[in-house]
Image: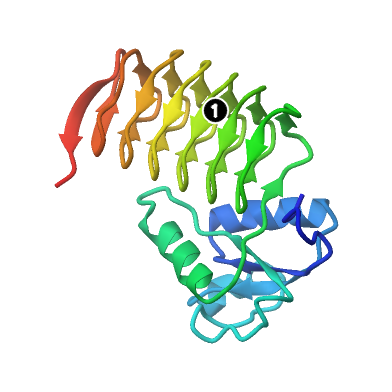
Amino acid sequence: MTHQADSARPLILVGSGGHARVLLSTLLLLGARVLGVVDPDKARAERLGVSYLGDDDTISFDPGEVFLVNGVGSVASIENRLRVFESFRRRGYRFASVIHPGAIIAPEAALSSGVQVMAGSILQTGCVVEENCVINTGARVDHDCVIHAHAHIAPGAVLSGNVHVGTRAHVGAGATVIQGVQIGSDSIVGAGAVVLSNVPESCTVVGIPARPILAKA
């Protein structure tokens, strides 16, 4: 699935790392028209097997004729992914959403532009996913969860009903968040953590049950 406004537009993939490779595989599976990839690392980009279109600064396509796909992952930090999204948005470009055909999304779920829902993930009724979020492979998001902009729900994470995940937050691989919990903006839930209570903004929690270990400056 690409941007609802014009699914016939060709796509440009931004980034060429592991996340970009998974997205490209999904786009080809969907039969999307991918013009090529934009990345500062030409050698890495060329290994994707599609046309290399230059780096971020040299892209010259008309923003009204293409959609972009944000292929920058957020394993170490959300900053690069967020920078790419905001930089191209300021230049008038719009980002396509990418929905793997193996994902299950309730008809009542609401997804904003630039959302990526990967293979095997589930979004139940009443869920809201804001722009530039990643619901990664096999993540399960139950009823009435709200995932705010630029957040990442990593592979295998489980959000029980009515969980709110703040802007730019990261819920790590295999983590479980029980019903009704709020994850603050810019927070990190470590891989495998079990979150039983609210997580403040700019906080990292790990373990079972999850406890804070580090607050960002």
Q: How many badges with numbers are in the image?
A: 1
Name the residue that disc number 1 marks: 156
Residue shown at the point (64%, 41%) measured from the top left = 111
Instruction: Left or right? Give the position of 23 relative to 151.
Output: right
Residue shown at the point (69%, 73%) measured from the top left = 36
- Coloring scheme used: rainbow
Provide residue 213's location: percent of width, then percent of height.
Answer: 18, 29
Q: Nearer the viewer, residue 13 or 94?
A: 94
Q: Nearer the viewer, residue 75 or 160?
A: 160
Provide residue 69's location: percent of width, then percent of height.
Answer: 63, 61
Q: Nearer the viewer, residue 8 or 118?
A: 8
Which element is circle 1 on?
loop
Residue shown at the point (62%, 52%) measured from the top left = 113
Provide residue 54's location: percent of width, then percent of height.
Answer: 57, 83
Residue 176, picture quadrant: top left
Vertical placement of residue 22 versus 101, above or below: below
Label 1 sits on what residue type?
Answer: Gly
**Badge 1: few (under 14), some or many (20 or more) residues near its Cα, within 10 Å?**
many
Q: Nearer the viewer, residue 185 or 76?
A: 185
Instruction: Left or right? Give the position of 51 relative to 157.
Output: right
Vertical placement of residue 142 versus 108, above or below: above
Instruction: Left or right? Give the position of 199 relative to 106.
Output: left
Residue furthest to the left in view is 217
Provide residue 105's location: percent of width, then percent of height.
Answer: 72, 30
Vertical placement of residue 50 versus 211, above or below: below
Residue shown at the point (76%, 35%) measured from the top left = 102
